[in-house]
Image (cartoon, coloured by chain):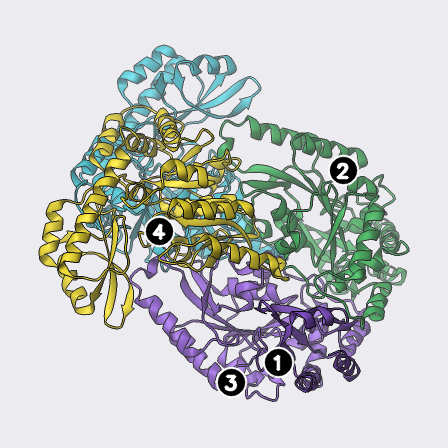
Chain colours: A green, B cyan, C yellow, D purple
Amino acid sequence: MLYFESDYTEGAHPKVLDALIKTNMESLSGYGNDHYCESAKEKIKKACECETAEVHFLVGGTQTNQIIIDSLLQSYQGVVAATTGHIAGHEAGAIEYTGHKVLTIPEIQGKINASTLKQFLEDFYNDGNHSHMVFPGMVYISHPTEYGTLYTKKELEDISTICHEYKLPLFLDGARLGYGLTSSQTDVTLPDIAKLCDVFYIGGTKVGALCGEAVVFTKNNTPAHFITFIKQHGALLAKGRLLGVQFDTLFTDNLYYEISQHAIKMANLLKDIIKEKGYPFYLESSTNQQFIILTNEQYKLLQEKVRFSFWEKYDDHHTVIRLATSWSTTQENLLKLKDIL
Amino acid sequence: MLYFESDYTEGAHPKVLDALIKTNMESLSGYGNDHYCESAKEKIKKACECETAEVHFLVGGTQTNQIIIDSLLQSYQGVVAATTGHIAGHEAGAIEYTGHKVLTIPEIQGKINASTLKQFLEDFYNDGNHSHMVFPGMVYISHPTEYGTLYTKKELEDISTICHEYKLPLFLDGARLGYGLTSSQTDVTLPDIAKLCDVFYIGGTKVGALCGEAVVFTKNNTPAHFITFIKQHGALLAKGRLLGVQFDTLFTDNLYYEISQHAIKMANLLKDIIKEKGYPFYLESSTNQQFIILTNEQYKLLQEKVRFSFWEKYDDHHTVIRLATSWSTTQENLLKLKDIL
Amino acid sequence: MLYFESDYTEGAHPKVLDALIKTNMESLSGYGNDHYCESAKEKIKKACECETAEVHFLVGGTQTNQIIIDSLLQSYQGVVAATTGHIAGHEAGAIEYTGHKVLTIPEIQGKINASTLKQFLEDFYNDGNHSHMVFPGMVYISHPTEYGTLYTKKELEDISTICHEYKLPLFLDGARLGYGLTSSQTDVTLPDIAKLCDVFYIGGTKVGALCGEAVVFTKNNTPAHFITFIKQHGALLAKGRLLGVQFDTLFTDNLYYEISQHAIKMANLLKDIIKEKGYPFYLESSTNQQFIILTNEQYKLLQEKVRFSFWEKYDDHHTVIRLATSWSTTQENLLKLKDIL
Amino acid sequence: MLYFESDYTEGAHPKVLDALIKTNMESLSGYGNDHYCESAKEKIKKACECETAEVHFLVGGTQTNQIIIDSLLQSYQGVVAATTGHIAGHEAGAIEYTGHKVLTIPEIQGKINASTLKQFLEDFYNDGNHSHMVFPGMVYISHPTEYGTLYTKKELEDISTICHEYKLPLFLDGARLGYGLTSSQTDVTLPDIAKLCDVFYIGGTKVGALCGEAVVFTKNNTPAHFITFIKQHGALLAKGRLLGVQFDTLFTDNLYYEISQHAIKMANLLKDIIKEKGYPFYLESSTNQQFIILTNEQYKLLQEKVRFSFWEKYDDHHTVIRLATSWSTTQENLLKLKDIL
């Protein structure tokens, strides 16, 4: 069986694992009060080229989205997101659980745009009944999106401008940020993101760590008593070192980029194979997730030899599937996949 | 100034007020433990022709929606509603506040239909990732809808059938139920609703009471310790008599129907006037709310002499407004409105 | 049967009811946007002698406590209250429902004091682990307390000083405020309360209204978009006039004080009767609630002729009961009670 | 610097780490759908000697308490716990965040007892106003407790009997369960706990894992759609293998017991040292946490060379501290500590 199901089917990148092994016997205080967390934070700040950045570590993606959003919104506010946003459909209502509505706006290939956002905000404030409605309180985007697509720098700037015009924090979900930063089709850098967003996170789980996401508040805007807030939400890790050591390693010697570049390289190879074999793409993605359309027969046959993700029904006879690469994807397995396809 | 803004611009119907006056000095226990509440409950059960019905009184509509939905859903469930449903857009996130997502499905003139609902439920259960999604836990409809439209008995039966096939309680928001029951275009009766729905409420606030909604659980299905649940939600009225006396009166000598019939009669007169004057209707409503399209100039002019509700923008040059009648609407005022139009 | 069960066993004071009757046919906008609400707010501000006061009307006591507390606390904060505070034990967890802990501190006859409060706050901030604990975010007191007792002006000043030293808003629950203000044993006035507290409410339900509580934010500190917040919590009354008209009347010609004074006068008469009959008081109360200790035999006998409130077990053979007076208590009924006792 | 601050100052037990290394490159499905999770679950069921047990893995202790409690309680219910219970004071209000009150009852050295519990429950149901109060919905205990003390089998049986008499699930927090099971002073086994409790968890974080707690529902009573519930609470780990591999190792060849026994052995040595040096114990603990009373001078001096936990103030001149042992505590370090003491 070949695994192209997701970018988290293996454990940790060997260098990350090595760091855990090497530091294992060191006695350290809990809850993130250790020198690895400190070091990781400094390295991330530096990578962001952002003096005012403050970094916190959390365990997983849904948890991170939930905590960031709940910590920044007032009770009467909701978060604006694409209808296809991860928080809108695939987190089991984790945002609503915290009492906040996800206010969805139309998207194209997973991306919202500044004018749609502006229209939504204008309509809200022009509505005579808006005091009986959920106030937009922040904007959520992901980069790459659910469909592996990327914002251009110009698009991000425009969204950021609208957000700040309406005094809404802009939050970028970077669960797969590495694959966005190392795509050959992007002009967006980590410092750009730190500049344009008010908060974002750098995904570890899907980019070579066992677990872990690094939250970056970019404008000295960490919510007050954020540690207590995290604890209250059941998300404070006792052995905070587990996150600190991993991110310290990921941000040493460019490892985070290396890991991502490898996955992108493998994804490009995968795209070539798919093109060669004549399977239609559902859309053009320049990151590590590729979406292709299979007939239902092809779907069933492929299932016998390859693990992939069902994405959505295309029509009665076709299905969209996702194939993902990661740090652990090998050329060898891609060639095996080619044979199967 | 003429008031056609809503059906709650005056106080209580004179008979309701009289009952409050007559019973005012009676000493009664609090929290609904009084004989007026008991009597009102019996009368409502009788009007519903439903032996297994259990009745509770609450103060307002949003509160009632919030409490019913939160009491029937499990944590991991959401409520299915039309995209235009009152709970979806105009209750300031009161459902999300309780931790539940409003799962919206397409509507036509405010109504959902059985096949759209069925499709939504099938898609949900067919989705391989549905354990990461909010489970549909009940279905919310309103009758009349936000647009004054009504379900036919057949439509309700079909929706009810799908709900029960999927073991989802069907909840009918009857904030304006009287106007639905007394429309000349309906074949749906109160006993029909009691039979087809698992819970619904009979609106008082918008049908002649100072405040109050009568919740009817129809299948011996009142949530355990519902009084405590209501108290916890801040919705238990100390002087429960205020609701008991009002509903006891509304369900004496057919008053609830009389009040509603008067409003419908006035609405029909209003429709004649609008037709005569040549204003286009936004849609055909057979209840007490009428939606018409004004040019922006007409809108401004009308605003000077009449209070009405802004509904939504039709296009850049036109606006949809709502005019509502009630027990207190007079023929005299309608004629004045005619002159103005 | 005689009713001394509570101060809300009858409807509204006749003058309040009259005002509802007189204004009933007036057409008014909903949700508190009417001139009676405006007028009532102005009168209350004047009675408070507080220029910076902002007034909002809500329906009931638990709802009011819930909304004020939830609106002022941050997620990681709780509300400090006496162990016997109404919010701590008798509101079915309405505060916890909003996500906040009630942090209880010891009390004497329902009252907390400044030094206990200070000790609690010092201990909290001295605790090395306090980032893993709920932060005190505001202080709740009631006046009169659950036991009918009253704070002196000095006591309130001291509590207020500690609160402001620790930057905690002081919230006074005035569900029975009238009886506190008109007790012969008090030196605390409404302007004192407005000065010393950051928010408080003037109870209507238990002081002659059908329902209604007037919330007063005293320092220009109404939470942003408070109407939306109220709506979200299911507590925005459509016919806001119902509250506006009642409070406008209660604050016209001193009615609120008159009502309260009558109850106090009746309570003093009740105390004389109890003393004369030799029943022991559980504690000394100078307001409209009196707590007496009955043997279990006396308890059973009294139950046959009088409705009163069970308060708590005193010991295996004795029970504490509460008798309450109100605007509607008559000397005649007190004399009947005397005969029974 | 010597570390006796807690039992989670080092990484993972070498065997646990080895297992992570060995399995690292294996491709596995996410979210706990892997064969290591399956294997670990089977081993735990076997260790519990409980056919009806169902096992789930979560990341941390507060998260686990939060999720178990929120999943088992109805909205109107709270959880009964000792006033010193971890959930009552040291989890930043994580339980209240989910909407539930922690109902505290008196304890002795961290333990509640059956008669206090019974009294509390009787009082609740005898209270005429209990419909306005939070219903007790489950009982929380920890074993060992916050103070390292242990329940006897008889005590657990008695508590269990009362719980089941009142139809309340009994939940045992086993964050440090290993140290309870391997104490020389206990007669309580893992099968006893599985038999007497309705749900409990086996702590990994504090007993040799990097992170992880194994929740055991013992009576086929896992809440419906528990995975979705976990996801909604932000607690579903993408790489579920991280927990599966660790627990699979901990429950292979008795490792969980071995780890615990070592800590107990070291704790006994520590106790001997403390006794020899004449420091007073705050209480008698037979597990891996030892509480001793220091003068404030001793406290300051010790701080320079040893990391320990501040526990609480004993009086103005004395402080209670905690010293903890774990799998990684060495005799060598204990001897160094002896020299320092």
**Residue type marked 4:** Thr
Q: Relative to A27, is B176 on the left or the right?
A: left
Quarter of the view holding residue D329: bottom right
The chain identifier of the residue carrying mark 2 reads A
Q: Residue at x 58, y 19 (%)?
A: B316
**Residue type marked 3:** Thr
**Label at residue C145:** 4
Q: Which residue is mark 1?
A: D280
Q: Residue at x 77, y 43 (%)?
A: A52
Q: Which residue is mark 2?
A: A196
Do callouts 2 and 4 point to residues on the same chain? no
> How far separated are the C-alphas under marks 1 and 2?
58 Å
Q: Secondary structure at mark 4?
A: loop
Task: For the residues labelled 3 and 4, say whether their Cβ atoms are less than 8 Å apart.
Answer: no
Task: For the residues labelled 2 and 4, say whether their Cβ atoms are less than 8 Å apart.
Answer: no
The chain identifier of the residue carrying mark 1 reads D
Q: Is residue D210 visible?
A: no
**Residue type marked 1:** Pro
Q: Name the residue furthest top.
A: B339
Q: Is residue D253 visible?
A: yes
Pair 3/4: label in front: 4
Do callouts 3 and 4 point to residues on the same chain? no
> How far separated are the C-alphas under marks 2 and 3?
59 Å
Q: Which residue is mark 3?
A: D152
> How far separated are the C-alphas under marks 4 and 1?
44 Å
